[in-house]
Image (cartoon, rainbow, N blue to C red):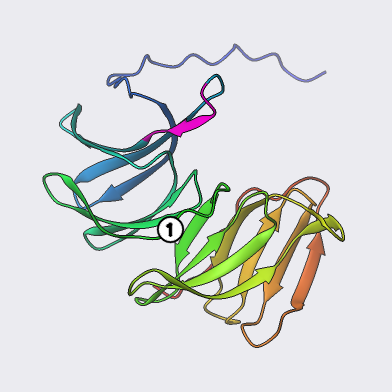
C-alpha cells in the first residue's frame, strides 16, 4: 500500500493586483511586467481589454486594444495579437505607446511570435490560418490554411512557433495536430497527431 502523505499547503500570495479585465498573457519587458487582458461583453457584442503595465505592484499605465490576447517581447518593444484580429507593436517605457497597428480582420488572433528581427508569425484562431507578417508596417506576406476538421470547416489554431534547427514554422490546433510548415510550400512538411487539442508549443528559436 502506498504511504499516505499530508495534503500540500501553499502560502497566500504576497502581491495581488486587480486588473480591469481577465488576464490572457504576461510578458517581462525589461524590469516591467505587461499583462494582456480581454473580455467579451455579450450584451453589446463587443471585445474589450488591452495592456496593463505593472510596476512596483501597481498599474502604471493601460492601453486599450479591444482585447490583448498574446504577447511577444523583443527588447523594449512588444508585439501584441489582439482579440479583433490585429497586430500591434507597442513601445514599453514608463508608459505604453503604439508605434504600428494593422487593420482588424474580425477574428481572434490567438498567438504571435517573432521570426527574426523583421517578421512575425501569427495564429489566427478560428479561421484555421497561420500567417507571416513583415514587422515594418505590419503587412501580411504569407499565409497557410493550416488546420481544418474537413474542407470548409476550420479548426481553431492556438499556437505557433519557429524552429531554428529545421527552419520550419509550427502550429497547433483544436484538431489535435501539430504541423510544421516550410515557407516554400502550401502543404505541411510534417503532421503529428495528439490525443487532444494542441494549445502551446515551445521551439528553439536560436536566441
Residue 31 drawn above or below residue 186: above
Q: Which residue is under mark 1?
A: 103
Q: Residue at x 57, y 68 (%)?
A: 131
What residue occupies the far right of the structure in this picture? 150
> What is the x, y in percent for residue 100?
29, 61
Residue 195 located within the stretch drawn in magenta: no
Residue 48 is left or right of residue 5, and the answer is: left
What residue occupies the far left of the structure in this picture? 94
Residue 55 drawn above or below residue 20: below
Give the quadrant of residue 151.
bottom right
Query: Can see residue 32?
Result: yes
Q: Nearer the viewer, residue 54 or 106?
A: 106
Q: Nearer the viewer, residue 206 or 172?
A: 172
In which quadrant will I find the C terminus? bottom left
Q: Residue at x 59, y 12 (%)?
A: 7
Crowd around label 1: few <14 · some 14–19 · many ≥20 (10 Å) = few
Query: Can see residue 201?
Result: no
Residue 162 is left or right of residue 61, and the answer is: right
Q: Which residues are magenta?
A: 44-49
> What is the x, y in percent for residue 114?
42, 67
Q: Residue at x 67, y 71 (%)?
A: 144
Residue 88 is left or right of residue 5, and the answer is: left
What residue occupies the far bottom of the structure in this picture? 184
Residue 171 drawn above or below residue 135: above
Give the quadrant of residue 103.
bottom left
Amino acid at each position: 500500500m502506498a504511504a499516505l502523505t499530508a495534503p500540500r499547503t501553499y502560502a497566500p500570495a504576497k502581491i495581488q493586483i486587480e486588473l480591469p479585465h481577465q488576464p490572457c498573457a504576461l510578458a517581462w519587458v525589461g524590469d516591467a511586467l505587461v499583462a494582456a487582458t480581454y473580455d467579451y461583453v455579450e450584451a453589446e457584442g463587443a471585445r474589450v481589454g488591452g495592456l496593463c503595465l505593472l510596476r512596483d505592484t501597481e498599474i502604471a499605465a493601460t492601453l486599450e486594444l479591444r482585447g490583448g490576447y498574446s504577447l511577444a517581447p523583443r527588447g523594449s518593444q512588444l508585439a501584441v495579437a489582439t482579440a479583433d484580429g490585429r497586430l500591434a507593436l507597442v513601445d514599453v517605457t514608463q508608459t505604453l505607446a503604439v508605434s504600428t497597428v494593422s487593420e482588424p480582420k474580425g477574428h481572434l488572433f490567438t498567438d504571435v511570435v517573432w521570426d527574426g528581427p523583421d517578421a512575425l508569425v501569427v495564429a489566427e484562431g478560428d479561421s484555421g490560418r497561420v500567417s507571416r507578417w513583415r514587422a515594418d508596417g505590419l503587412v501580411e506576406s504569407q499565409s497557410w490554411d493550416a488546420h481544418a476538421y474537413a474542407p470548409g470547416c476550420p479548426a481553431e489554431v492556438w499556437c505557433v512557433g519557429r524552429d531554428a534547427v529545421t527552419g520550419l514554422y509550427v502550429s497547433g490546433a483544436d484538431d489535435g495536430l501539430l504541423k510544421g510548415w516550410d515557407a516554400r510550400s502550401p502543404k505541411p512538411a510534417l503532421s503529428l497527431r495528439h490525443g487532444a487539442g494542441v494549445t502551446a508549443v515551445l521551439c528553439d528559436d536560436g536566441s
